[in-house]
Every structure is written in structure tokens, then in C-alpha cells.
Image (tube, rainbow, N blue to C red):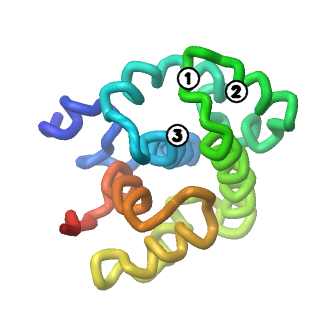
Amino acid sequence: MSKENARTGWFFRDEEPPNDNSYFENMSRAVFQAGLSWQMVSDKWPAFMKAFKDFSIEEVSNFDEEDIEKLLSNKSIIRNRSKIEAVVVNAIEFMKIKEEFESFRNFIDNLDKSENYKFVKKELGKRFSRMGPKSAMIYLYSIGEKIKHEE
């Protein structure tokens, strides 16, 4: 296990995430991580797993306003409406990608990764909610892509 893995426990550096739900979970974590303490998010992550049905793309893509309201009243997680809504919207986008590419891995593999993933970061920002350049960079790094840290 690398030093990064030992610290965060969610980075896939020497292996690919095992399935689309794992890719989705890491993206969701990058969304919630933005602007917050790594430790706080890490401490709350078991509650996120429960609240978001172990990040089952199919289940989360079917969340409705009632589910969102329930999450907003859940004191065990970070109750940020725009981040919660982003996770639901992103689950729907994962479903579209599965239809189009069969898997998220196929989607990523079909993108131009030159210039330190410039196009990939842009594409993630277009297709997914709250995936700005920094969140996209953290996400790509967390799923084992060979992205280089930007200053």
C-alpha cells in the first residue's frame, strides 16, 4: 500500500477500481471533498456509504426530491444540497455512460490523455456536476490515472 493509500484509504494507485460503482464512489468523494478537511470527509465516509446505498449507481440515479430531503436531514453526512444533488445527477450520467460505452473504464480509455489529461478534465467538467479542474484532477489521481500534480 502506498503512502497515499495509507493516509486516505480510497486512492487506487496500483490497481484500477473494480467496477463502475467504485468509480462513482470516488467521484462522489471528490465532490464532497472540495473545500473541506480530508479527515472530516474520511471520518464521515461510512455514513455516506450507508446514506448513498453503497454508491450503487442504479439506486442513486433513482433518488428523488424526498430522498434528497432525507439526506439533508441526515446529521451523519455533510449536508450540502448542491453536493448531494450533484451525486444524484452524476449517477444519472454514469447510467448514460454505461449505455454508451458499457463501462466507465471504457469511457475513460476512449479519451485523449495527452497534456496531463487536459481534455479528460474538461470532459469530466462537461458531463458531471461539480467536477471542476481541481476536483477532476483529484478524482483522476484517485482512480489510478497517471495524472501529474499541477501547481
* Nearest to N terminus: mark 3 or mark 2: 3
Judge by depth and name the residue closer to the eye, 111 or 93.
93
Q: Secondary structure at mark 1?
A: loop
* Nearest to N terminus: mark 1 or mark 2: 2
The reply, left or right, for residue 17 in relation to residue 102 is: left
In the rendering, at what x and y percent does residue 95 appear? 73, 54
Are circles 1 and 3 on residues that touch, CB within 8 Å?
no
In the rendering, at what x and y percent does residue 89 appear? 72, 52
In the rendering, at what x and y percent does residue 69 appear? 79, 28
Crowding at mark 2 (Cα within 10 Å: few <14, some 14-19, many 20+): some
Say the numbered circle drawn on residue 10: none
* Nearest to N terminus: mark 1 or mark 3: 3
Q: Residue at x 73, y 37 (%)?
A: 60
Q: Residue at x 26, y 64 (%)?
A: 146
Q: Secondary structure at mark 2?
A: helix
Taking the image as drawn, is residue 151 in sight? Answer: yes
- Distance of mark 1 from mark 2, alpha carbons? 8 Å
Taking the image as drawn, is residue 19 in sight? Answer: no
Pointer 2 residue? 72
The reply, left or right, for residue 60 in relation to residue 123 is: right
Q: Quadrant of residue 128?
A: bottom right
Q: Residue at x 49, y 40 (%)?
A: 32
Pointer 1 residue? 77
Q: Residue at x 22, y 68 (%)?
A: 150
Which is in the foreground here, disc 3 or disc 2?
2
